[in-house]
């Protein structure tokens, strides 16, 4: 005998209407489009960045600086010769910034100074990312005595003052160029990215997809290269973007002190060092290389902030 304890007789006027099954298109409502691939972290980050005005402003400035470094002839056709009779001369036709104490065109040097500074910044960043990522990933993924030895090795370099060490090494070198300066800066500047990489790898190496790769018999180095590092790359890229501006400033500092690039190489730091000799008479000659340096560094820092916010899910939620 059926149990009718829970059946209720509808009251008058409260009859329930049940639509025919063919009129209820539940399948259309609940359908999921599987033809489109799911969005990755980088796709979501790009969608977030392209809607931010700060991204386009910083990108435009970076493109402008790179064009100055690669193709300076697009912006100036002035002569690189310095004429002492033009010393500290004001702006004239074809020389919109005037001349420095040696009679060199300030606009020409401001444009051509981008090449040395950007070259040192890019090379230093590449060296730092390669070295720091290698050491940090090995320490974080393999652990054990690898982690102990590499972490203590990193701490030794981390305890050395970055700029002071670069000053000491550069003062001992005779032949100095962009590559030499970049190598010296990278020798003492990789420690931060090594720590960042180690922490990112530690947060990724125990995820399910890494366990699945191990179960499939994939080697440890293959897992590190194909699965762990790509998923730990976000903080590395963010740091590299900001570090590039830091290394540009470091090169300018060394050149300003006279132990960076040689005086025959046009650089913003070298022009700042020359400008201090006439700062009381013509302070404006220091403004142009300083402004170019500040805008370049600011553009990379702004880009780093945008990339960090786009790649950080917590920042997107805020």
Image (cartoon, rainbow, N blue to C red):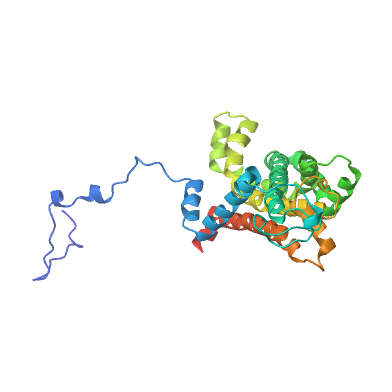
Asked whether the viewer can see residue 203, the reply is no
Question: Please, which residue is most extreme toward the front here?
Answer: 85
Question: Would you place residue 216 above or below residue 264 in this image?
Answer: above
Q: Horizontal and vertical percent for residue 153?
A: 81, 44
- The residue sitting at 58% across, 29% down in the picture is 218
Using residue 91 as the reference point, say whether residue 316 is left or right of it. Answer: left
So how many labels did they put on this image? 0
Q: Horizontal and vertical percent for residue 60?
A: 55, 53
Which of the pair 187/268 is nearer the observer? 268
- The residue sitting at 49% across, 61% down in the picture is 317
Q: Horizontal and vertical percent for residue 30?
A: 28, 50
Question: Please, which residue is most extreme toward the left here?
Answer: 12
Using residue 161 as the reference point, say whether residue 299 is left or right of it. Answer: left
- The residue sitting at 54% across, 30% down in the picture is 216
Question: Would you place residue 149 above or below residue 49 in this image?
Answer: above
Question: Would you place residue 32 above or below residue 318 in this image?
Answer: above
Rendering quarter of residue 9: bottom left
Rendering quarter of residue 306: bottom right
Q: Horizontal and vertical percent for residue 151?
A: 77, 46
Which of the pair 10/100 is nearer the observer? 100
- The residue sitting at 60% across, 58% down in the picture is 302
Which of the pair 100/151 is nearer the observer? 100
Asked whether the viewer can see residue 166, the reply is yes
């Amino acid at each position: 005998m059926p149990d009718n304890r829970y059946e209720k007789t509808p009251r008058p006027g409260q009859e329930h209407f049940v639509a025919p099954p063919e009129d209820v298109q539940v399948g259309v409502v609940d359908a999921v489009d599987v033809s489109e691939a799911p969005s990755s972290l980088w796709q979501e980050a790009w969608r977030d960045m392209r809607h931010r005005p700060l991204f386009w402003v910083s990108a435009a400035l970076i493109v402008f600086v790179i064009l100055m470094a690669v193709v300076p002839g697009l912006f100036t056709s002035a002569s690189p010769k310095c004429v002492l009779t033009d010393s500290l001369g004001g702006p004239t036709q074809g020389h919109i910034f005037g001349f420095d104490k040696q009679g060199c065109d300030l606009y020409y040097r401001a444009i051509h100074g981008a090449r040395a500074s950007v070259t040192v910044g890019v090379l230093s960043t590449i060296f730092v990312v390669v070295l720091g990522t290698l050491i940090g990933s090995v320490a974080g993924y393999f652990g054990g005595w690898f982690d102990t030895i590499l972490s203590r090795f990193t701490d030794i370099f981390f305890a050395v003052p970055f700029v002071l060490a670069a000053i000491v090494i550069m003062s001992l070198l005779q032949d100095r160029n962009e590559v030499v300066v970049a190598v010296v800066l990278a020798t003492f500047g990789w420690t931060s990215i090594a720590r960042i990489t180690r922490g990112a790898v530690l947060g990724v190496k125990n995820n399910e997809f890494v366990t699945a790769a191990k179960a499939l018999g994939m080697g440890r180095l293959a897992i590190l290269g194909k699965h762990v590092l790509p998923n730990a790359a976000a903080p590395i890229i963010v740091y590299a973007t900001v570090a590039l501006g830091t290394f540009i400033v470091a090169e300018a500092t060394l050149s300003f002190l006279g132990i960076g690039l040689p005086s025959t190489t046009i650089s913003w730091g070298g022009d700042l060092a020359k400008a201090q000799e006439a700062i009381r008479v013509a302070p404006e000659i220091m403004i142009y290389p300083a402004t170019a340096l500040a805008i370049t560094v600011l553009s990379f820092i702004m880009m780093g902030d945008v990339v960090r916010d786009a790649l950080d899910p917590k920042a997107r939620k805020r």
